[in-house]
Image (cartoon, rainbow, N blue to C red):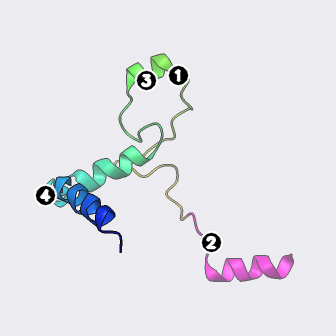
């Protein structure tokens, strides 16, 4: 309802630059790897010189960490676990 704020929002929106990440074929892969701290596949040796990094987990060729077992329990396992508590 405030016209001053409305103008401020419109000015801010006009400065927004959209970057289409879907155009980069490997963006999703890079993004997922970067979500791991430190990065799942890139060693970043200069980072290791600055801070103590945790030990790396073994990754498979597709980048999956560990034994690639599902993290979530099945519905049956959850129900059985609730029954024991």
Q: Mark 4 points at which residue?
A: 23
Distance (Cα) linking label 2 and label 3: 35 Å
Distance (Cα) linking label 1 and label 3: 6 Å
What label sits on residue 73 in the rendered view?
2
Helix, strand or loop at mark 1 = loop
What label sits on residue 47 in the rendered view?
3
Q: Indicate which disc, 4 or 1, sits on the residue closer to the N terminus.
A: 4
Q: Is residue 70 visible?
A: yes
Judge the density around disc 2: few (<14), some (14-19), many (≥20) Cα neighbours within 10 Å.
few
State the residue at coordinates (67%, 83%): 76
Q: Name the residue under label 1.
A: 51
Magenta run includes residue 38: no
Q: Which residue lies furthest to the left in this view?
A: 23
Q: Is the magenta stretch mostly helix, strand or loop?
A: helix
Q: Is residue 52 above or below residue 32?
A: above
Q: Is residue 51 above or below residue 30?
A: above
């Amino acid at each position: 309802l405030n016209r001053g704020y409305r103008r401020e929002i419109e000015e801010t929106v006009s400065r927004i630059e959209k970057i289409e990440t879907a155009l980069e074929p490997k963006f999703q892969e890079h993004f997922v790897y970067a979500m791991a701290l430190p990065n799942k596949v890139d060693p970043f040796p200069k980072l290791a010189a600055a801070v103590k990094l945790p030990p790396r987990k073994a990754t498979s060729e597709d980048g999956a960490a560990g034994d690639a077992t599902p993290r979530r329990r099945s519905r049956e396992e959850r129900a059985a676990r609730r029954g024991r508590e």
